[in-house]
Image (cartoon, rainbow, N blue to C red):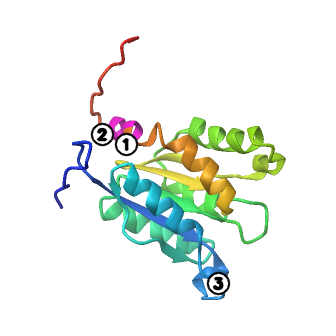
Amino acid sequence: MSAAPSPEGQAVLPAAVVVASNRAAAGVYDDTTGPLIVAALREWGFDPGEPDVVPDGQPVGEAIVRAVALGARVVLTTGGTGLTPTDRTPEVTAPLLDRQVPGIAEAIRAAGVAKGIPTAVLSRGLAGVAGQCLVVNLPGSRGGVKDALAVLAPVVRHAVEQIVGSDHARGSGD
């Protein structure tokens, strides 16, 4: 699959969004976080397709594995990072990661706390590299997703380029 150029002249890279929600997967209600993530990824020069809405737990891991196998350069998950018994996203993500990138997950939690959301520290989301793909677990709330996207916006493209060893332009201070 060849990547088309983005408006900024960079190639549009494949990506995926995985929504962990028992109720949304069962059709009890429509997911509202996946579309936020899809829109952000498109703005950043990725092609995520439509969100994959799956039940909590192992289906999340299976969706991540599928996306990586299909060549996604970034997979953003939402949901399943809290403390309820069904919140299993970090547990199914961890064994898929070749190496973790803890600074991303820490920054996402810190962004929520900085906005006055003390419960942001309860998110157990992980970030790391699976093959040539950046995988990041985002919280399941719309506010948590927005905070996470603000953290990711300035770094995600650089991160996915670094994963495959691409060089980057140096700023004036480098």
Asked if residue 159 lies in the magenta stretch, the reply is: yes
**Which range of residues does the magenta coloring cover?**
158-163
Distance Cα–Cα, label 1 vs label 2: 7 Å
Q: Main secondary structure of the magenta part?
A: helix
Q: Which of the two residues, 39 or 11, is positioned nearer the viewer here?
A: 39
Residue 120 horizontal side relative to residue 134, left or right: right
| Quadrant location, the C terminus | top left
Task: Reply above or below: 140 against 105.
Answer: below
Q: Residue at left 36%, top 39%? A: 163
Q: Three-letter amino acid code at disc 1?
A: Val
Q: Between disc 1 and disc 3, whose residue precedes?
A: 3
Q: Residue furthest front?
A: 7
Rendered image: mark on residue 164: 2
Q: Which of the two residues, 161 or 155, is positioned nearer the viewer here?
A: 155
Distance Cα–Cα, label 2 vs label 3: 38 Å
**Around disc 2, counting alpha carbons within 10 Å, would you say few (fewer than 14), some (14 to 19), or many (20 or more)?**
few
Report x, y in % for residue 137.
Answer: 58, 55
Q: Three-letter amino acid code at disc 3?
A: Tyr
Mark 1 touching mark 2, by CB under 8 A? yes
Q: Three-letter amino acid code at disc 2?
A: Val
| Quadrant location, the N terminus | bottom left
- Residue bearing mark 3: 29
Q: Secondary structure at mark 1?
A: helix
Q: Between disc 2 and disc 3, whose residue precedes?
A: 3
- Residue bearing mark 1: 160
Report x, y in % for residue 6.
Answer: 25, 50
